[in-house]
Structures are given as C-alpha cells and as structure tokens.
Amino acid sequence: MRILFLLFVFLGFAFSQDVSVKASVSASQVFIGDVFDYKVEVVTKEGAGVTLPSFVGNLGSFEIRDLKTSEEKLKDGLVKTIHSAVLNTFVSGDFALAPQEVQVVFEADTVVTLTDPVAIRVLPRTTEADVDILEAEGPVSVPGTPWYVFALIALGVVLLALLFVFLWKYLKRNVTEKVLPPYEEAMLALSILREKKIADSDQGQYFMELGFIVRRYVEKRFKVDILDATVAELKQRMSCVAGLPEAFKMGVVSLAVETEPVKFAKVNLEKDRVLHWENFAFELLEKTKPVPEEEKKSGEKR
C-alpha cells in the first residue's frame, strides 16, 4: 500500500510538472479610460481538461469589455490555452490584478494552481506623469499652420497688388490711343460705309451714317460745332466757317435738308441722288484735306 501511495504521489507530481500557468497584461501603465488586454495562459498535455477563471467579480475596479478563449498546439503533445479579457477602468492608482484559479484534470489527476498577481498603474490624464509618458514616447507634432506661412501669404498679396498698380500706371502712361487725323478718319469711315452696301436696302440708315461722317469731318477739320446742330443751326454755323469754299458750305446744308425726309419719313431718293451725295462726301474730303508743311513750302516757292 505504501508503495502504491508513493507511486500515486509521484505520478501526480510528474503531471503537475507538465502544467504551467502565466498571467500578463499588454501594458503595465495606462491612462484612465484606456483599454488593455489581460491574459491567462495555461500549458497542459493534449487531452487535459482546463477549467478557466471567469474573471467576473474578481478584477476589482476593472471592467470587462470583451472576453475570448483560444487554443494553440505546441510541440511534444502540449497545448496552450489562452483566456483573455479586454479591461479598462476610470479609477487612477496602483493596482494588482488578483491571482486567478486554474484547474487542470488529466485522466485521474487534478492540478489546481493560482496565477501570480499582476501589477498595473492607471494614470489620470493631463498630469505630469501623462506628460512624462508622452515625452518618453517621443516628440508629438501638434497639427496647425505655422505663423510664417500666413506672413508669406500676406507678403505675396501685397507684392501682387504693388505689381498690379505698377503695371497699370506703366501701361496707362505708355499706351496711348491712336487718334486718326480728320481726313484719314473720314476716308476710312466712308470706305467702310461703301463696302457695307446698305444704300439700296436701307437709305435711312445709309444717310444717317453719311451725314454723321461729313459733319464730324467738317467739325474737326474747321473747328465748328455742327455735329448735333439742327438744320436751322447748321445753316447759321456753316456760314461762319472760315477756309471752307462756299460750294461745300452749301453742299453740307443741302445734304442735311434733302436727306431729312429719308432719315425720318422713310422717303427714298433716286439712285443718282444717292450716288451724288456719296461723291460729294469724297470730293469734300479730297478738296479740303490739309496740305503737309513740305507741300506748302514747295508750293510757295513755285
């Protein structure tokens, strides 16, 4: 009997050597509200029955957020059972997670063991310890735009504004509108009017434009205000124009009188009269165009 008892004790001791239990946490130092993993790992022979701790009511102020169990086959016929819980707490301080009881049964042998307690520190946020941990983990970049970026943008806007002002003044000073002399302006306008060929289809519009060209030429060439004059005013003002032959004075007035019904009463003139006034305008320009100084001097010598 004594031999059998000793054999039983030996076999039980030998089986207990094949059982190992370990408890651990994923982080030994956390902040209030942070989650972390708490694991109990049991290594036994394959086929052994393992009774794992429930954790419920045995973890103090720590709350269980999730539970899971998994197995992993090892060498030499061993199996690792991993019982893990996701925990967090809203109480700061230094804690020790209590030892957890694990029971392993293999054939007729039973082993009951406890895990070692696991220390963990829970830190309040926005404390010096919090800052120390952040510094230990490395510099933290704070998102945001540096002040000098805004300064460069403002400088760029100012430079663009100054450049715009400079260019505007430069162009205003150096780009002048090309103004044609009265003769060239009138000849160009008459040529464009002739090319439009509107005399046959719209005499009213044609004589509106022809009368404007003639009056504008005489006004600019002989310095007399007749562009907006009525027929009565035109007669009076044309009589006072110096340097313009009398025939052309009368012609300007007659053009206004004869074409008045055409422009405002839709009366049409005969084609020969239309051609007459067109030729009159060209002749007026050719006979009264300014003579260049060189031609004047050569004419005086002759």
Image (tube, rainbow, N blue to C red):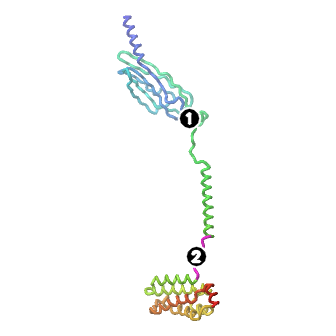
Q: Dot 1: few (<14), some (14–19), or many (≥20) neighbours within 10 Å? A: few
Expressed as whole percent of the image width and height from the top left, the position of residue 22 reads: 46, 23
Where residue 178 is drawn, which disc sits there? 2
Amino acid type, callout 1:
Glu
Which quadrant: the N terminus? top left
Give the residue displayed 55% in from the left and 29% down from the top: 121
Give the residue displayed 49% in from the left and 92% down from the top: 276
Q: Nearer the viewer, residue 18 or 51?
A: 18
Give the residue displayed 48% in from the left and 26% down from the top: 24
Residue on which disc 1 sits: 137
Range drawn in magenta? 174-181
Expressed as whole percent of the image width and height from the top left, the position of residue 144 reads: 57, 46
| Number of numbered tags placed on the structure image | 2
Left or right of residue 18, residue 174 in this image = right
Q: Residue furthest top?
A: 2
Q: Magenta segment: does it hold 178?
A: yes
Is residue 138 shown to the viewer in this render? yes
Is residue 228 shown to the viewer in this render? no
Q: Magenta segment: does it hold 68?
A: no
Cα–Cα gap, marks 2 and 1: 74 Å
Which quadrant: the C terminus? bottom right
Q: Earlier in the sequence, mark 2 or mark 1?
A: 1
Q: Is residue 109 placed above or below 256 in the rendered structure?
A: above
- What secondary structure predominates along the stretch shown in magenta? loop
Q: Is residue 100 placed above or below 89 in the rendered structure?
A: above
| Viewer-nearest of discs 2 and 1 | 2
Expressed as whole percent of the image width and height from the top left, the position of residue 261 reads: 49, 91
Q: Indicate the quadrant where residue 76 lies.
A: top left
Q: Secondary structure at mark 1?
A: helix
